[in-house]
Image (cartoon, grey):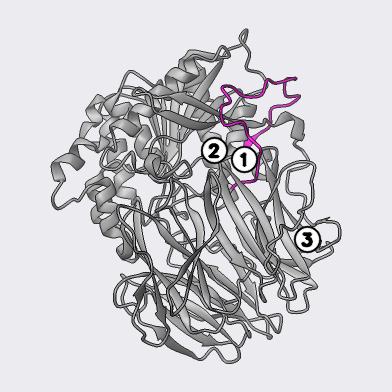
Amino acid sequence: MTRSGFSRTPLALALALAALIPVTTATAATPATATAATPATALPSKQYRIQDFIDTVGVAGASFSADESRLLFSSNKSGIWNAYSMPVEGGEWTPVTRSTVDSTYAVAYFPHDDRVLFTRDQGGNELNHLYVIGADGKERDLTPGDKLKASFEGFSHDGKHFYVSSNERDPKVFDLYRYASGDYARELVYRNADAYQLGPISADGRWIALAKPTTTNDADLFVAELGGGQATKVSAHTGEAMFTGQDFSPDSKWLYYTANDQSEFAQLRRVEVGTWKHEPVQKTDWDITDNYFSHDGKYRVVAINQDGSTAIQVFDYASGKPVALPKLPAGEIRNVSISRSEKRMAFYLNGDRQPNDLYTLSFGGQPKQLTRSLNPAIAATDLVDSSVVRFKSFDGMAIPNILWKPHQATAQAKAPALVWVHGGPGGQTTRAHSAVIQYLANHGYVVLGINNRGSSGYGKTFFAADDGKHGREPLQDTISAKKYLQSLDYVDPDRIGIIGGSYGGYMTVAALAFHPDEFKVGVDIFGVTNWLRTLESIPPYWESFRLALYKEIGDPATQRDFLIATSPLFHADKINKPLMVLQGANDPRVIKPESDEIVAAVRKNGVPVEYVVFDDEGHGFSKKKNQIEGYGKILNFLDTYLKGDGAPPRTGQP
């Protein structure tokens, strides 16, 4: 199956904080035992407004046109995400979509003409539909319906068909449909009666890989014939292990997959279709997270989660030899997409001071930079580099983190600090450009992005260390993170707060409720505060991993008392520190009533509470106007209650 050029990410088993911290990262040679951030050499020449940071242009994705003269990509240049195209040698952007209401994301050019596929939901409700812009320039919804969710799954090798998953038949499961590229006639080619997670499809259109999670640490891998064939389990193992289908070989004879049954980290192996014989392919000291082939199999692309960064490798498939990637001055390569002719590739450059910029490269030639995303009003020297740091938690477990140190923080001018908790629970704080964290650092806040136990990327034992312990041991890691920050001579030990989104929002409010004297303030961004409500109201399309989520967090039918004991809402009377809550009204994961209730409960304590609701957002804030308002208000709140004396917030946006 031909990839569109856009990352193919499986539906998360968690509540991810995608809007604030990138979950894919740049490569970096980072010392794993670093204990402090790189010393600053100069103060920032300027403190910037939040508008300046948000005026940095977001760009994502890359799909080559049929003649490979243009690239299709997504950008929030207009203030909201839309699809654009531009020449592969650089030049003016041409808007492909012009939405002013709902964020719209490019999917792919058609392989043999310049029709375009794109996707959008409605106000952040995550019910994405797939659309086409035809030769007449008109939009057409290829997946009409009121309640369904649909996703593009790739083109057939010859380009005559494309695959779409949809839960229109049953809201709990995703079936696979094959559409004709010409007239969009479709047929059901895999009826997903057993609620598998759909995986890659072979180039000959015969096979599909399927996953069946049993816990968040254990998933089996299957291969089935399209058109009704039985699913064959290909992941025999003992104990818990994660098996993930990556891609079929170009000749459709092998399924390449990753698995961590033989070590702490996911290794790359392959299984021969039909004989079900397994062979090793590649292993490293970190998780191999992605493996995919170019259109005719000339190249194999690999991504490795390397201590909070993503290392990209490209191999010549026939010889197995690595392909040299260009050396670039600032940032690291990620998100490689290879053209159908296999003569060109597109990729992104990203780093702490370098937001995503799109490049193209003709193999054997020099890279061409197509975008310059950083707002020219911002001097890159005023931004900060992150570093990997580790500390020992209360029980001696080593906890990895990403640390951002402001230029102005010194032993003589101690800075306030924040423990930043990622989403998940199995997410990961990574090294990459983050506008909001750079904004906070620019205004003098130390930010420690904690990867508490249960975070991904550090081995399966570490990943499983939070199971059934939420609100307890992982929360204790945040207390140890505070103590680590207090050990840094440039941090004010009495001005440390906690912030996070989604699961990180849960950890934030849990810290204030269960350890009310530890943190001076908390900022909760669409966080869970009532596990009973969240687990009983999860979207129906999470059915494939609902039981795995129950085993991770707790079963509302059988562990009600435990979930009440670990839900901050039921202990809100203990919260005595200022709290800020941000929420999207259309969030299908952490619904608005959950935030309404925690705000009302904490206000009864006479504690300062600021509540910000966006009527046109879901689980993450995608529109620039909302980011400017939300992040600006976060800084006002922190300046008032963490850095300042608790006086009423000043007016206007910083």
Does residue 315 belong to the magenta stretch?
no
Q: Is residue 49 found inside the magenta-colored segment of the image? A: yes
Dot 1, how many residues are within 10 Å of its Cα: few (below 14), some (14-19), or many (20+)?
many
- Amino acid type shown at disc 3: Thr
Instruction: Say above or below: 491 vs 397.
Output: above
Q: Point out the residue furthest to the top here.
A: 412
Residue nearer the viewer, 620 or 451: 451
Is the stretch drawn in magenta largely helix, strand or loop?
A: loop
State the residue at coordinates (43%, 84%).
Answer: 226
Quadrant assignment, res 508: top left
Query: What residue sits 35% from the left and 82% below the top?
Result: 191
Is 96 situated left or right of 150 in this image?
right
Q: Earlier in the sequence, mark 3 or mark 1?
A: 3
Lower position in the chain sequence, tag 1 or tag 2: 1
Location of residue 353 in the rendering, given as x and y in whole percent from the top left corner: 70, 38
Q: Position of residue 384 (x, y in %)?
A: 67, 30
The residue where tag 2 is placed is: 631
Residue 494 visible in the picture: yes
C-alpha distance separating marks 2 and 3: 33 Å
Q: Name the residue tied to disc 1.
A: 435
User: Which residue matches tag 3?
Assistant: 360
**Mark closer to the observer (3, 1):** 3
Specify which label sits upstream in the sequence, 2 or 3: 3
Q: Which residues are magenta?
A: 25-51
The residue carrying pointer 3 sits among few (fewer than 14), some (14 to 19) or many (20 or more) residues within 10 Å by Cα, namely: many
Q: Residue 302 versus residue 10: which sits nearer the camera?
A: 302
- Residue at the spot 70% in from the left edge and 84% down from the top edge: 112
Q: Amino acid at mark 2?
A: Tyr
Q: Please determine whether, in this image, residue 119 is positioned above or below residue 323.
A: below
Q: Amino acid at mark 1?
A: Ala
Q: CA distance from mark 1 to mark 2?
A: 10 Å
